[in-house]
Image: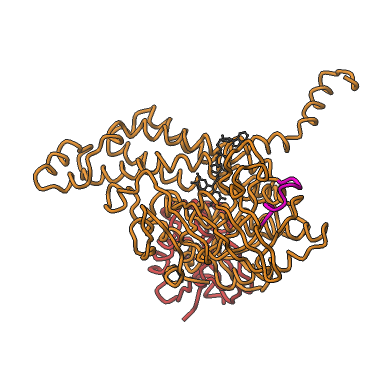
Amino acid sequence: MKTVTVKYCGHCNPHLQGPVILEQVKGKLPHVRFISGASEEGAGVLLVISGCPVDCAARPSGFSSVIATAGYTVDGRNVSKDTLVAEISSKLQGLLEDS
Amino acid sequence: MKTGMEYKDSLRSLNTQVYAFGKLVDDLVDNPLFQPHVNSAALTYELAHDPVAEDLVTATSHLTGKKINRFTHIHQNTEDLIKKVKMLRMIAQRTGSCFQRCVGFDAINATYSVTYEMDQELGTDYHQRFVEYLKHVQENDIMVAGAMTDVKGDRGLRPSQQKDPDMYVRVVEKNDKGIIINGAKAHMTGIVNSHDMLIMPTAAMKEEDKGYALACAVPVDAPGVIHIFGRQTNDDRKYGEIDQGNATYGIVGGEALTVLENVFVPWEQVFMCGEWQFAGLLVERFASYHRQNYGGCKGGVADVIIGATATIADYNGVTQASHIRDKITEMIHLTETLFSGSLACSSEGRKTPSGACFVDPLLANTVKQNVTRFIYEISRISHDIAGGILATLPSEQDLKDEKIGKYVKKYLKGVEGVPTEDRIRILRLLENMTGGTALAESMHGAGSPQAQRVMILRQGNLEHKKQLAKDLAKVSKKG
Ligand SMILES: Cc1cc2nc3c(=O)[nH]c(=O)nc-3n(C[C@H](O)[C@H](O)[C@H](O)COP(=O)(O)OP(=O)(O)OC[C@H]3O[C@@H](n4cnc5c(N)ncnc54)[C@H](O)[C@@H]3O)c2cc1C
C-alpha cells in the first residue's frame, strides 16, 4: 500500500477545514494510506494542507514529492471549491504512480 | 510534551493553597469555579499532539534539539514570533477565552535575553542558571505564570518610599542557600493552575529600590505562597451551563492575588537580585512581548464574537439589512487591524545579544493600545446588533421550568426554524464575552493604556518626523 504523509499549517484562519478535505481525498483514493504524522523528516509523498493561501506550514525534509494545498489553491493554482478534492486526488494519484 | 490529561493530573499532585469565597479549595481541577480555566490551559497541551495544530503549537528547542511545546520555547527568529501570533489566534478561536500560558511564555523569553545582557555588563552568572531552569521547564512542559504586577500601594511613590515595604515583592533575607522574599503579586492569570511562577519587577528601579529588583522562579505550591482567587462578573453562573455562555472554557484567565509570605527561593532559581539597572529592561522586554500577543489572542476572541453576532443577526432575521452588514464589516476590519499589528511587530523583530528574537516594541505597543479601544468597539457593535434581549434574558432555570418554560420558548423565539434555546445560547455567549471582567482584561492586561503611550512616544522617532517637515517646508536648519 502506498503512503502519503499529511502536514497541516495550524489553521489560524482557515478558509477550509483540512481534516474534512483529507477525508474526502481518502474517499477517492481508498488504496492509499495517509499518515497525519508530525514527523520532522520523511520519505515519499508529502501532502501539505494549509487553511489559507498564505501556505505557512513548515515543510519537513526528505520527501521526494510535495503537493501544497493552500486554501482553494493547489500548487499555487486557483481551484474552485467543487474541484479541490478531485484536483488533489488526481495529482496524488499521478505522483504515486510515478514513485 | 504533556497531554491535556497529563497536565490536569500534574495539578492534582501539587499542594497549591488556593482560597475562594473564604474557603480553602481542595478540588481545584474538578471544581466548577476553576474547571473552565483548567480546560483552557489544558488545550495548550492537547493541541501540541493534534496534527492540525502542531505546526504552530510545537517548536524545536535550541537548547536540546528536542520537540517541545511552543509555550516553553525561546524565539529564534521572526518566523517563531509570527507563529506565536498565529498560534494564539488559533487557540483563542477554539476557547473564546484566555488560555493563560502566554504570560509565562513572555516571561521566560524576556528573562532569557535580559539575564544574558546583565551578565555581559555586570559579570553576574544569572543566564546560565536561567538556561538550566529553562531546560527543566521544556523537559517537563511546565506551565509558568508570569508574575510581574505588584500590588503597588500608593502609585505616586517608589517601592522604597511606601509606608508598608511589602507593596512590592522584595528580598528580606539572603543566605548561602538562597533568598527569602515577601510581598504579593496582583491579577495573576492562571497561577492557581500553573506549576511555577516567574517573578519579575513591576517597574524600572533606582538604586534605593534595589531590594525590589528581583527575578526568580517559585513553585506555586511553595511553603508561604497563598493564592486568593478573584471574582468574575459571571462566577455564580459557573454552577449552571447555558447562562455561563462558554461553559467549557469560561472567560478571561481566572486571576488571583498571590501572597508571598517569607518564601524561600534557592539561588539556582534566582535570576536578578539587586541589579536595579536592569529592572527597566526586563519590564520593557516582557511588556513588549506580551503586548505583541493581543492581536493574536484577542483577534481569535473577536472572531468568535463576530461569529456570534452574525449568527444572532441570522436568528433575529436582520442579516440582509445594510447597516448590519456594514457593522459586521467594521468588526472584521477592527479585528484584522489588530492581527496586522501583531504580525507587523513580529516581522520587524530583531536578534538580541543572547540570540533570542525580540519584537519591534513600537509596533507591539501600538497593537495593545488599539486593543484597549477596538475590543470595546467590537463589543459595542455586537450589543447594538444583538438587541436589548442581551441584557434582559431570563435564566436557564426559567427556560427549563415546566410551568413557565413554554412562555420563554414562545416569546423569545426569533426566525422560524431556529429553536429558542439556540438563540438564548448564542446571546449568552455574546453577553459573557463582551462585558464585565472580559472587557476590563482588554484595557489593563499587559499594561494600562498610558503604559503603552509612554513607550510609543519614546520609540516614535519624533525628531526624524520633525526633520522631515522642516526639510519639506525649507525652514532653516538652525530653527
Ligand atoms: C484580567 C487581567 C489579567 C492580568 N494578568 C496579569 C498577569 O498574568 N501577570 C501580571 O504580571 N500582570 C497581570 N495583569 C496586570 C496588568 O498588567 C495591570 O492591571 C496593569 O499593569 C495595570 O496595573 P494596575 O491594575 O495595578 O492598575 P493601576 O496601576 O492602579 O492603574 C490605574 C490607572 O492609574 C494610572 N497610574 C498608575 N500609576 C500611575 C502613576 N505612577 N502615575 C500616573 N498614573 C498612574 C494608570 O495609567 C491607570 O490609568 C492582569 C490584569 C488584568 C486586568
Q: Judge whether residue B137 can be spotted in this image.
A: yes
Q: Which of A31 and B76 is in front in this view?
A: B76
Tell me where residue A60 sits by quadrant: bottom right
Specify whether residue B400 is painted magenta. no
Residue at left 49%, top 67%? B51
Image position, residue B446 (x, y; %)? 57, 45
Image position, residue B420 (x, y; %)? 21, 43
Residue at left 79%, top 63%? B124
Q: Magenta stretch? A: B205-214
Q: Is residue B63 left or right of residue A36?
A: right
Tell me where residue B344 sits by quadrant: top right
Quarter the C terminus of chain B occupies = top right
Q: Is the magenta stretch mostly helix, strand or loop?
A: helix
The chain drawn red is chain what?
A: A
Q: Judge whether residue B62 can be spotted in this image.
A: no
Is residue B54 shown above or below B397?
below
Count of numbered labels shown in the rendering: 0
Residue at left 84%, top 23%? B471
Q: Is residue A54 left or right of residue B396?
A: right
Looking at the rendering, the quadrant in which ligand 1 lies is top right
Image position, residue B198 (x, y; %)? 60, 59
